[in-house]
Amino acid sequence: MGRSTIVPLDVTVSTAFEHFRDGRFFNPGVPDHGFFDALKWMRTRQRGAWPRWVSSTPGPKPPERVEGATLRVTFVNHATVLLQTEGVNVLTDPVWSRRVSPVSFAGPRRHRAPGIRFEDLPPIDAILLSHNHYDHLDVPTLRRLAAEHSPEVFCPLGVAPLAQRCGLHDVQELDWWQSAAWQGREIHCVPAQHFSARTPFDRNRTLWSGWVMEAERGPIYFAGDTGFGDFFQDIGRRFAPIRLGLLPIGAYEPEWFMGPVHMTPEQAVEARTLVGADMAVGIHFGTFSLADDGESDPPARLREAMAGHEDADRFWILVEGEGREIP
């Protein structure tokens, strides 16, 4: 039997930064949108263009392992990325389901297939979960990973019980700025600016986070799902130079409503600078229509934001299933 570290949520859980009060987590200094804001958005939506389905061919089967300090990053879809280095294989927010919803017959559906077939995955040693939204924590995918790979799981506070119900027994649950030892390295839970919910009644009962995984040639940063905030500077001060940053670039329209919880592509470029990431990969776009930006808007805006930068080739937009190596 594996281990699970669970902190009871009826007490203040953070000793370093207050982000938990009266049984709920919150973003320090950031007002939370209420019901009437959401109603205004729904009444005034101007949806960008999304094709019903984008036909694609699955990417090649990734290598079984990548030994040594070489880092291979494979973009699967949305916020799902396969990281391979030093003989370990790590997945971020794995989602292979057709819909990201409480039910299989309604809710946001995918507009393209995952870039890597599930059966082509190498052995998965660990999963980094950023929060409990359906497009980041997909129960059918986690159940299959538990049955076929038995990976260790790292998740923010309150998420471990759901992960365990998926059959994942080796779960470590962390607060912001807490760390855990794994496979001879440290994995750090870091702040993000977002929210959590899986029903209308559990908003912000569990925490959201990003993750930093130590590696021989520099840390790897997975930002999860986040708006833009001062915490990027804090992450940079603690961990820079970061070898690779996985930064979300989609679901930002309309900015007046989505801004607190989702970055624009321009903000992702600034975030890369603040955290001190040598390389970056854009995530959280092109698979599920979750806001009002169109399917091709995030990469187009990112390319425009990077145009003229002397290191414009160091913020990658990968096609689903594409894998690249960083020596």
Image (cartoon, grey):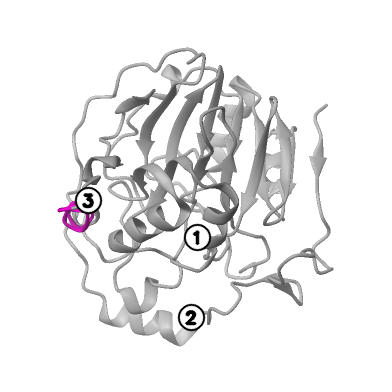
Decide which of 226, 271 is in the foreground and name it.
Answer: 271
205 up-or-down from 295: above or below? below
Mark 3 vs mark 2, foreground winner is 3
Does residue 112 appear to the left or right of 211 in the view shown?
left
Callout 2: helix, strand or loop? loop
Q: Earlier in the sequence, mark 3 or mark 2?
A: 2
Mark 2 nearby-residue class (10 Å; few <14, some 14–19, many ≥20): few
151 up-or-down from 296: above or below? above
Which span is picked out in magenta? 299-308
Residue at the image position 65 percent from the left and 39 percent from the top: 187
Q: Earlier in the sequence, mark 1 or mark 2?
A: 2
Residue wearing tag 1: 232
The dot on residue 299 is 3
Label 3 close to label 2 by CB (< 8 Å): no
Does residue 183 appear to the left or right of 242 in the view shown?
right
Residue type at mark 1: give it: Phe
Residue wearing tag 2: 33
Q: Position of residue 3 (x, y in %)?
A: 81, 34
Mark 1 nearby-residue class (10 Å; few <14, some 14–19, many ≥20): many
Q: Position of residue 5 (x, y in %)?
A: 81, 44
As measured in the structure, the alpha-carbon distance from the residue carrying label 1 to the one carrying label 2 is 22 Å
63 up-or-down from 237: above or below? above
